[in-house]
Image (tube, rainbow, N blue to C red):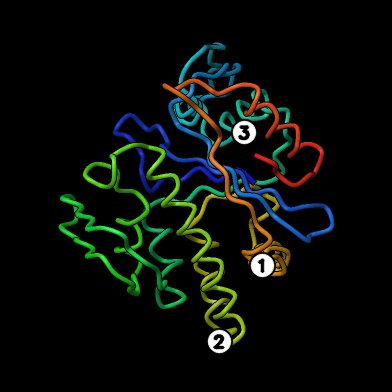
Amino acid sequence: MLGSDKTDINSNGRAKSAMLLHLSADRSRGALLSVPADIPVDIPACSAADGTRTRPQKAPFNLAFQVGGAACSIRTFEKLSGVRVDHYVVADACGFEKMVDAIHGVDLQVDERIYDPETDIALEPGRQKLNGAQALVYARTRQGVGDGTELNRMRRQQYFMKVLVDSIVDTATARPDRVYRMLDAATGALTVDPGLDSLSKLYRLWDDVQGISSAHTQYRVLPELNSELVQPKANDLFGQLRDDKELSL
């Protein structure tokens, strides 16, 4: 699944964050790989929203979403990695907030003060429960947090995803109705491929995910240095995903 996070889109329409979720064939483990937005990649010819065909080009990965949406992002990632993407999920800010609010927030550790001038929301350090709007600030803010790098934000997003999944699992145990509400909200708040376009299909995916504990999920960031992939580490990661192996890096 390639999830392109529209909670942080530039004014030119480029999606800033993308993650690949890999579930092992036997559903015993998972891997979540964050893909840096600015790594240069070969973007193939894609169909644009106006029906025209774009030209192949060498450009930052997040340009693929701007020129051809989720389909172009998937084709670009598959070309880069050789990993087949079966499904995709695209979340905008509203959809992100609705999903978090549907389970009555997520409880996580905020390591330092985070302030978003656009919403005037400030998160103070400490363990706390975040509602949808606060969680959005936590996941998307880059400037003024840590060293201000994209790597810092991607690691924060991965921590948030871990906490979110654990929260949903806990909620499913205590209050199954809240998980149903979250998935119901997701059907109207997310853009997904036809394989996930109904409540029953999303629930089947969730059934696969919830059986894999966070202890058996690996979290990785595609290695880069100065906006270039670090080789052979990146290709080694891609190979392990293709072969359905545990990630060794």
Is the C terminus in the top left, top right, bottom left or bottom right quadrant?
A: top right
User: Position of 165 compared to 94: left or right?
Assistant: right
- Is mark 2 in CB contact (under 8 Å) with mark 3? no
Question: Local crowd at mark 1 within 10 Å, few (<14), some, or many (≥20)?
Answer: some
Q: Look at label 3 and name its amino acid.
A: Ile
Element type at mark 3: helix
- The residue mark sitting in front, 2 or 1, is 1
Q: Amino acid at mark 1?
A: Ser
| Residue 158 drawn at (x, y percent) | 49, 52
Residue that numbered label 1 is attached to: 213
Which residue has dot 3 on it? 74
From this viewpoint, which residue is outermost toward the right?
Answer: 26
CA distance separating discs 2 and 3? 35 Å
Q: Is residue 195 left or right of residue 73?
A: right
Task: Give above or below for 99 relative to 220.
Answer: below
Front one among 18 and 99: 18
Nearer the N terminus, badge 2 or badge 3?
3
Location of residue 170 (image quadrant): bottom right
Outermost residue on the front side: it is 248
Circle 2 is placed at which residue position?
A: 175
Residue kind at label 2, given as amino acid type: Arg
Image location (x, y in percent) of residue 210: 67, 69
Where does the image place residue 211, in percent across and percent down from the top left? 72, 69
User: Is 187 above or below relative to 36?
Assistant: below
Dot 3, how many residues are within 10 Å of its Cα: few (below 14), some (14-19), or many (20+)?
Answer: many
- The residue positioned 45% from the left and 48% from the top of the image is 155
Q: Nearer the viewer, residue 102 or 41?
A: 41
Q: Is residue 54 above or below residue 47?
A: above
Q: Secondary structure at mark 2?
A: loop
Q: Earlier in the sequence, mark 1 or mark 3?
A: 3
